[in-house]
Amino acid sequence: MLWKSADYSGWGRVLQAKGEIARPERQAALAALLDEGLLPAMGMRRSYGDAALNDGGRAVDMTRLDRMLGFDPGTGILDVEAGARIGEIAAAFGPKGWLPAVMPGTGFATVGGCIGQDVHGKNHHHAGSFCEHVVSLTLRTAKGVVEVTPEKTPALFCATAGGLGQTGVILSARLRLLPCKGDVMVVTERRMADWEKFIAHLDTSRATYTVGWIDATAKGAALGRGVLEEGETGSGLMPQRIKRRKVPLDAPNFALSSPIVRLFNGAYYRRVPEKGRTVVRPISDFFFPLDKIHDWNRLYGKRGFHQFQCVVPLDQAPALREMLGEIAGSGLASPLAVLKRMGPGRAGYLSFPMEGYTLAVDFPNRAAARELIKHMQARAAEVGGRIYFAKDSLARAEEIPAMYPELDLWRKEVAKADPEGRLATDLVRRLKLRVAK
Amino acid sequence: MNRTWIILGATSSMARAFARAVSQEGAGVLLAGRDRTDLAALAADCQLRGARVAEAVDFDARQPDGFAALVARMEAEEGELNAAVFVGSMPEQAAIDADPSLIDGTVTDSFTGPARFLQMLAPLMEARGGGTVVGVASVAGDRGRLGNYVYGAAKAGFATYLSGLRNRLTRAGGHVVTVKPGFVDTAMTWGLPGMFLVASPEKVAEDIQKAVRKKRNVIYTPFFWRYIMLIIIHVPEFIFKKMKI
Ligand SMILES: Cc1cc2nc3c(=O)[nH]c(=O)nc-3n(C[C@H](O)[C@H](O)[C@H](O)COP(=O)(O)OP(=O)(O)OC[C@H]3O[C@@H](n4cnc5c(N)ncnc54)[C@H](O)[C@@H]3O)c2cc1C
Ligand SMILES: NC(=O)c1ccc[n+]([C@@H]2O[C@H](COP(=O)([O-])OP(=O)(O)OC[C@H]3O[C@@H](n4cnc5c(N)ncnc54)[C@H](OP(=O)(O)O)[C@@H]3O)[C@@H](O)[C@H]2O)c1
């Protein structure tokens, strides 16, 4: 059948939707579907909130349009359908000495989803955002199929990169891959005893890939402690472990209660020897550490979870420290918390990155956590930072224009590409993104 | 060793997963079906994943005139020749009730068309002294039931055909694997009511590859369908005929 009636949600499972979904298996079927009118597209729905939801309406699932169409080893340009997953591309090309230039923390994200959120990776400080490596893309807009490039159609490109699927359905893209030495990672892990040490190391790190795990439950002198990971690609032989685990059931609520998280975090911190260590890992273990456990979002139980992610300008590190202090004081955070330094790279009007520090913390979905996140969002805005649409379920419409000063430019292009507003999603409606003041 | 697979019905997502899996091992793939544009995209993908050759070729189960050319194309490849059949069609039983002529097409797509092609390919495989045929039948062929008995009958016919072909090719060093999938998450089942324990196409492809390696004869995929069908087959007819499953 063409349409499947489904109840579905984003990765955080808090916001839900009900509606009909089509999942074409070939381009001709997709084209026929869109001839009837544009539909919001969804990838693997790894966005935590409602970016890929259309409650009460229809949507098109792009995940079966996932072929790699051509590769030019001279330029490193890969032509690929929008439903292809980043991890699949890395697995096919890593052994040949190429990787997607930017990879988010899950290999399940699709090319279309990575463009729709202009995602960043562990190398953002060097490589910039995903769409800075998009040479061109084919986009189905209300006017038909158009070729979009940063040079020839700059405004449409900027509205599509990080544009939450509002300019049209991305059919395929040409990505400039990055040469790599091979498909193993040489990773150096170091304990960071506190916030000051962490920030200082992030500021001076020269590694190609860096990411910091932060203990969002540590307080007092230990506030901001964590583990800094610095990685370089390398060549060698590394057995690819394909053992995958699955979370079969929703976990009970106490699984992530505060004493358990504190215990876990302490152990996780001390796992790395005091003097640090260098280890060799398969590429997927470094870039997509959680993908080995399928459906790990079920660990948070039926109520689901939130991720708060913000970025603040470089000179606002002290404000971010204060925010972390409030989070640690609340005892609500889960073990998943990440601190990174970002470079200035961004490709679209609504792209998340800005030069500064980004903090991401997961919280089980509780009233107190929701209040705390809302408070953090307001704080981020006050200090000139912004929140990430890929992670959000809680922001309020009035907060957005200050965080995203190019919103009006985006609106103008979106109105041209989809004048009837057929591509609107739950997130776009909740945050009134397409409605001008 | 040079290995080539001709994959009939290569636009099926199950076939796509299988084509990718054998491509990763360096086999050649001839991707046969009716939608040239789609098959060309898959061929490019297989090539980038490591296929020795990857090519889209025309195959319509209802146009047997084209079969000889396909067999000739296979003959042009050196080494071991293999075939995997994913072709099949399952019109709604209600549509067939309204227009009984749909039976012909269903049987041609799911049984006689592919069987005729395999019959033409068999001598070549015998001459090469090996190779494997994978035939995708269905649990629906194990017992006729209200919801899809024409499709089920075609699949039962195909399974019986495969059993005979196995008898024949085994003598020449070849092998035949009969695959009986349960519910698989493909275009055929998308949005159908009453689906449960639905397997991914990748899981099915993995099971098929394992069965080819181990020279299994008949597999159910996922494996538990063997037990579900064991029960269904043993329900006495006087009860079964009143059941609605
Ligand atoms: C464990 C985990 C780790 C993560 N780590 C990172 C990280 O390090 N950095 C980072 O930036 N993000 C990260 N994310 C977020 C994730 O990368 C993004 O949410 C990404 O968009 C997910 O891709 P998807 O295919 O699931 O897209 P979806 O969530 O399905 O969709 C995202 C948006 O893109 C649009 N879209 C999708 N496909 C198309 C298409 N073909 N045409 C038009 N629009 C389309 C949708 O409408 C939606 O607005 C992480 C998420 C998880 C679960
Ligand atoms: N999905 C399940 O739960 C399930 C369960 C048991 C068995 N099966 C069997 O698994 C196989 C693959 O099916 P699927 O689920 O992946 O569904 P599908 O996408 O509908 O696949 C059917 C395939 O058969 C092809 N085909 C149909 N009629 C044809 C014809 N006259 N000539 C050439 N090709 C023809 C289709 O090609 P076009 O693209 O050109 O139409 C398509 O490639 C089928 O044999 C099916 O019966 C499926």
Image (tube, grey):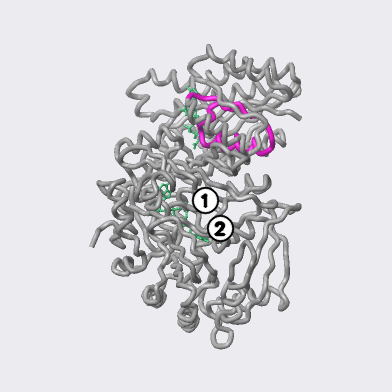
Residue A245 position (above or below residue A58)? below
In percent of the image, x 68 and y 57: which residue is there?
A: A233
> The disc numbered 1 marks a residue on which chain?
A
Q: Which of marks 2 and 1 is nearer the N terminus?
A: 2
Decide whether residue B239 is among the magenta residues: no
Q: Of B177 and A86, which appears nearest the observer? A: A86
In percent of the image, x 60 and y 57: which residue is there?
A: A292
Estimate how packed mark 2 is, as few (under 14), some (14 to 19) or many (20 or more) residues with alpha carbons within 10 Å: many
The amino acid pointed to by label 2 is: Ala
Residue A311 position (above or below residue B189)? below
Location of residue A118 in the rendering, given as x and y in whole percent from the top left corner: 46, 56
Single out the residue that lies furthest toward the left: A437
Query: Looking at the figure, which quarter contains the N terminus of chain A?
Result: top left
Residue, disc 1: A133
Helix, strand, or loop for circle 2?
A: helix
Location of residue B119 in the rendering, given as x and y in whole percent from the top left corner: 62, 16
In the rendered image, is residue B141 in sight?
no
> The disc numbered 2 marks a residue on which chain?
A
Q: Of A162 and B87, which appears nearest the observer? A: A162
Decide whether residue B32 is among the magenta residues: yes
The amino acid pointed to by label 1 is: His
Magenta-highlighted residues? B7-34
The answer as to whether callout 1 falls within 8 Å of ligand 1 is no
Q: Residue A127 carries which label?
A: 2
Helix, strand, or loop for circle 1?
A: helix
In the rendered image, is residue A54 in sight?
yes
Location of residue A275 in the rendering, given as x and y in whole percent from the top left corner: 73, 77
In percent of the image, x 42 and y 45: which residue is there?
A: A61
In percent of the image, x 46 and y 77: which residue is there?
A: A316
Location of residue A142 in the rendering, given as x and y in whole percent from the top left corner: 30, 41
Query: Looking at the figure, which quarter contains the C terminus of chain A?
Result: bottom left
- Circles 2 and 1, Cβ within 8 Å, touching? The answer is yes
